[in-house]
Image: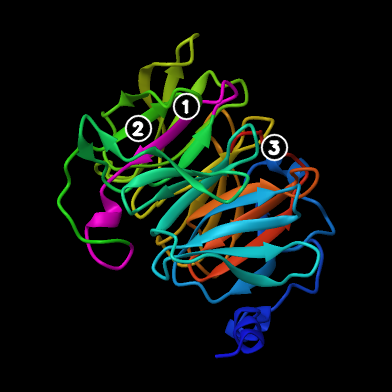
Amino acid sequence: MAGNERQQMMQQTPTSAGWRDQPRYPDPLVEALDPRFQKYIIFSAAVERLYTGSRWAEGPVYFGDGRYLLWSDIPNNRILKWEEETGAVSEFRKPSNFGNGNTRDRQGRLITCEHGRRVTRTEYDGSITVIMGRWQGKRLNSPNDVIVKSDGSIWFTDPPFGILGNYEGHKAESETPMAVYRVDGETLEASIVTDDVLGPNGLAFSPDERILYVVESRGLPNRRLLAFDVAADGRTLSGKRIFIDAGPGGTPDGFRVDIDGNLWCGWGMGEDGMDGVMIFAPDGDRIGRIRLPERCANVCFGGPKRNRLFMAASQSLYSVYVNTQGVAGG
């Protein structure tokens, strides 16, 4: 296939998969469930579908210096790139070693969790540094999602989801416990901060970094979003507690936090009409919802002002402008 033909295939229009832009403001897909959410809704901003054609979209991360967004298409073993100025979509990396969650470190470098059982950093010259691939000599499971703290440390979750079959990785036996890891950004010294989470998934810090939130995908009887207190030295956790019980059918996945401490959580696979993003206040109350026609796996804030929410949802990439900003490091 010629390069131009391939590019045209990748640049599918929003209407090519049954999506229709909302012609009326305010967009009914952005819904306040609590009066506190009203101030975050921009009256003249609508949900936009930027691309469709992934098999399972994950891990969006925005690069303001290049005006582009990267996200993972795990089953297709690639990372895609969306250009903010033109809307063009291309392959940034293939194969991606089944890349999943992405973020940037405080020096602007791409950090990627790979179901190929490692966490990597893409250097400025394009070379790849392995941040971590083994724990005490044994291979990691399938690193899932990642964030970077203001001290430069890299925190990631390592459930076995990517090695359970051959669709999003290579089927293999687990060698290490499910855990959340912290890696020093300079020495790359690693430690387990908790192995007391059933299926650790998305994670993020509160704006002051005193709380770490972690999605427990295998929580019983329901998925849960846990909260931990972060020690003053930023190296250990305590005070594990349930922050949100997702309830029957509730499926929090990847999420990010805004400057007011609200959690914007990918959501779906519950009842019809629940796919999209759920927004929770710092006290755990559900205050808002963004409805999508597909389950949303992960989100990030981007744009020059960090006020555009990008949503990686099943086969597509969506966005909407909101009246807040994402915290740095997510």
Tell me whether the residue at label 2 lies in contact with that at label 1, contact meaning CB atoms closer than 8 angstroms.
yes
Q: Nearer the viewer, mark 1 or mark 3?
A: 1
Examine the residues drawn in magenta and state their main secondary structure: loop
As helix, strand or loop, the secondary structure at mark 3 comes to helix
- Mark-to-mark CA distance, 1 and 3: 23 Å
Distance of label 2 from label 1 (alpha carbons): 11 Å
SS at mark 1? strand
For disc 1, the marked residue is: 212
Neighbourhood count class around disc 1 (C-alpha, 10 Å): few under 14, some 14–19, many 20 upward: some
Q: Considering only order in the chain, which callout, 1 or 2, is on the residue closer to the N terminus?
A: 2
Q: Nearer the viewer, residue 286 or 297?
A: 297
Q: Which image quadrant is residue 240 in?
A: top left
Q: Which residue appears at 39% of the width and 58% of the height?
A: 97
Specify whether 138 is left or right of 226.
Answer: left
52 versus 270 height, above or below: below
Rendered residue at 26%/45% (across/down)? 141
Q: Nearer the viewer, residue 27 or 143?
A: 143
Question: Type of residue at label 1?
Answer: Leu
Numbered tag placed on residue 36 in the rendering: 3
Residue receiving disc 2: 180
Disc 2 is placed on an element classified as strand
Q: Position of residue 30 (x, y in %)?
A: 68, 57
Quarter of the figure that contains the N terminus? bottom right
Please report the bounds of the magenta region as a residue range: 149-168
In the displayed structure, 193 sits above or below 27; it is above
